[in-house]
Image (cartoon, helix red, strand yellow):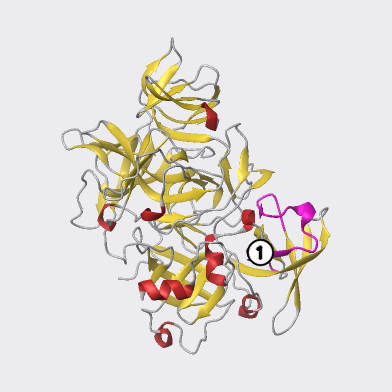
């Protein structure tokens, strides 16, 4: 059974724009990358009454553990150490918190790394696939039965690329190790960074000392005496889940172990999405501390009450280490009373175990090697004449892809493919030279060259991410633009970037002929994975 459109949150009922508009777009671009310094406040496009938290498994809008949420007009952001938010883009394997309405239309998407810091010396174990960052144990996942396979980014393609001293950003589920009595981050994404603004650690408070103003997050001691507490009404206590930020030079190793002087500590709310107005929530992650006798387990540090929840698929069971998706309501004690629990299956047709991509092809090497939404896709297992009868794939062709993550590469392997028309919020990409920039109305003209020179008006907004370029420096710069077409044919930009500079370059650019220094290319991929 194909579950590609089995979307429990909503059905897509969107108006269609002419296919010719999509086919006219050319270039490369994609689904990850830089940040903007603009204020990333909440969008008013929808009223948030529900929240979803989990792993990014695709882009159509955005898929969170297989559930599609419309994010075309949402603010996608990351919280900074000083309490401000910066605009950013979602990437495969990231953990996100989404505030949305009952139809699945999102107002905010908050990207939540589990830990950001430096890979500790002597901690990389290539056999166990483990290492340590800021006192937090991290384990890569190569077993699809126990959750999403780890996605690598920022130049990493496999665990073997990781080295002590690397700056990294880790996303994943906190899983309790009853033997070591610590939480281990089962990584869904491991990304190498060229620089970080601060050390970030997320986890449950233990050993709170209100006199010394310290607490522990696993083997890290956090000194919070000079930290700003957010929200200001929050109270610290053992068992509370927090995010702590501190300067890189404030992470020190002493006689009593590793410590971080925090500049800011944020207490996460039970609903897991800051802008959600109700207790309705959906949460995905790895089960810990399951008790049959009490009918409870822990998920991302949150207590889940099984009660009379519907369990699916038929025959599935709850167990420690299982990756589940819980829907329910948040109680006054911050626990979640589940109404339904879906246990992730290894099958690639399971919507929580697959990558879903909907969008226009951004770059193409041949009929089985192309990039969609910033993700390189190997479609060699697909019979194209059956999947897209009468269609020759090209840049601009709108496709729907179901795929799986592969080991040792950032190329996903397509298990199904379909060609379709663009809809109202289908993401398209174009590249060319920016000109006639009007910062008052926030627009410019994009001139593309190919078999013929074409021009298109591009509009940006408060939700647009700029990477490697700013609104003030757009004029004359060659840029890649990702966005959707409005009813008048204007390309409404979600991302504008300059791939010629490091700050605007993305992993998938290597598959479009842009040298990122990694040596990745379609020819290298084919020699190792086909």
Say left or right for 153 vs 317. Answer: right
Q: Residue at x 72, y 78 (%)?
A: 449
Residue behind mark 1 = 481
Compared with 344, 396 (above or below) is: below
In the image, residue 464 lies at what x, y percent?
Answer: 66, 53
Residue placed farthest to the top in the image? 211
Instruction: Using a 10 Å C-alpha cutoff, classify the residue at mark 1 as few (fewer than 14 neighbours), some (14 to 19) or many (20 or more).
Output: many
In the image, residue 343 lies at what x, y percent?
Answer: 27, 52
Work out whether residue 258 or residue 348 is closer to the camera in this orientation and state it. 258
In the image, residue 216 lies at what x, y percent?
Answer: 38, 24
Q: Quadrant of residue 148?
A: bottom left
Disc 1 element: strand
Work out whether residue 492 or residue 499 is closer to the camera in this orientation and state it. 499
Whether residue 530 appears in this view of the structure is: yes
The verdict on residue 272 being magenta is: no
Work out whether residue 135 or residue 49 is closer to the camera in this orientation and state it. 135
Compared with 213, 92 (above or below) is: below
Which residues make up the magenta segment? 460-487
Q: Quadrant of residue 418?
A: bottom left
Residue placed farthest to the bottom in the image? 390
Compared with 207, 157 (above or below) is: below
Image quarter (top left, top right, bottom left or bottom right) of the N terminus: bottom left
Work out whether residue 391 or residue 465 is closer to the camera in this orientation and state it. 465
Whether residue 42 appears in this view of the structure is: no
Say left or right for 435 vs 334. Answer: right
Say left or right for 298 vs 152. Answer: left
Image quarter (top left, top right, bottom left or bottom right) of the C terminus: bottom left
């Amino acid at each position: 059974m194909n579950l590609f459109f089995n979307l429990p949150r909503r059905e897509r009922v969107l108006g269609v724009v002419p296919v010719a508009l999509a086919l006219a777009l050319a270039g490369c671009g994609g689904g990850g990358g830089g940040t903007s310094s603009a204020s990333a406040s909440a969008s008013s496009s929808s009223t948030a009454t529900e929240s979803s938290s989990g792993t990014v498994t695709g882009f159509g809008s955005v898929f969170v553990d297989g559930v599609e949420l419309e994010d075309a007009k949402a603010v996608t952001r990351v919280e900074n150490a000083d309490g401000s938010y910066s605009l950013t883009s979602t990437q495969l394997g990231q953990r996100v918190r989404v505030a949305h309405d009952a139809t699945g239309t999102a107002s905010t998407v908050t990207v939540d790394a589990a830990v950001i810091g430096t890979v500790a010396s002597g901690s990389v174990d290539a056999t166990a696939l483990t290492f340590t960052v800021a006192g937090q144990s991290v384990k890569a996942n190569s077993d699809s039965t126990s959750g999403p396979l780890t996605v690598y980014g920022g130049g990493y393609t496999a665990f073997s690329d990781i080295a002590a001293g690397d700056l990294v950003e880790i996303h994943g589920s906190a899983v309790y190790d009853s033997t070591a009595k610590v939480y281990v981050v089962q990584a869904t994404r491991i990304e190498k960074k060229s620089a970080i603004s601060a050390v970030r650690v997320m986890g449950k408070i233990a050993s709170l000392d209100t006199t010394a103003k310290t607490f522990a997050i696993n083997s890290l001691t956090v000194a919070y005496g000079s930290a700003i507490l957010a929200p200001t009404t929050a109270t610290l206590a053992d068992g509370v889940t927090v995010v702590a930020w501190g300067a890189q030079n404030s992470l020190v190793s002493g006689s009593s172990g590793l410590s971080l002087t925090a500049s800011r500590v944020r207490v996460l709310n039970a609903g897991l999405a800051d802008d959600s107005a109700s207790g309705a929530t959906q949460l995905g992650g790895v089960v810990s501390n399951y008790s049959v006798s009490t009918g409870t387990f822990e998920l991302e540090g949150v207590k889940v009450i099984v009660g009379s929840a519907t369990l699916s698929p038929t025959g599935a069971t709850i167990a420690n280490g299982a990756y589940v998706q819980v829907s329910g309501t948040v109680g006054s004690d911050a626990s979640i009373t589940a109404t339904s629990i879906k246990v992730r299956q290894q099958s690639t047709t399971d919507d929580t175990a697959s990558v879903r991509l909907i969008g226009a092809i951004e770059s193409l090497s041949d009929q089985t090697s192309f990039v969609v939404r910033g993700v390189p896709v190997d479609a060699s297992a697909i019979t194209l004449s059956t999947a897209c009868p009468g269609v020759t794939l090209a840049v601009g062709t709108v496709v729907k892809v179901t795929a799986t993550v592969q080991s040792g590469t950032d190329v996903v392997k397509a298990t199904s493919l379909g060609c379709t028309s663009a809809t109202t919020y289908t993401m398209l990409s174009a590249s060319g030279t920016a000109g006639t920039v009007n910062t008052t109305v926030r627009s410019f003209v994009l001139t593309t060259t190919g078999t013929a020179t074409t021009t298109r008006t591009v509009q940006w907004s408060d939700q647009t991410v700029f990477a490697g370029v700013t609104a003030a420096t757009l004029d004359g710069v060659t840029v890649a633009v990702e966005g959707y077409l409005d009813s008048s044919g204007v390309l409404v930009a979600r991302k504008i970037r300059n791939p010629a500079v490091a700050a605007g370059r993305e992993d998938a650019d290597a598959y479009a002929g842009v040298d990122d220094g990694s040596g990745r290319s379609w020819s290298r991929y084919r020699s190792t994975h086909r």
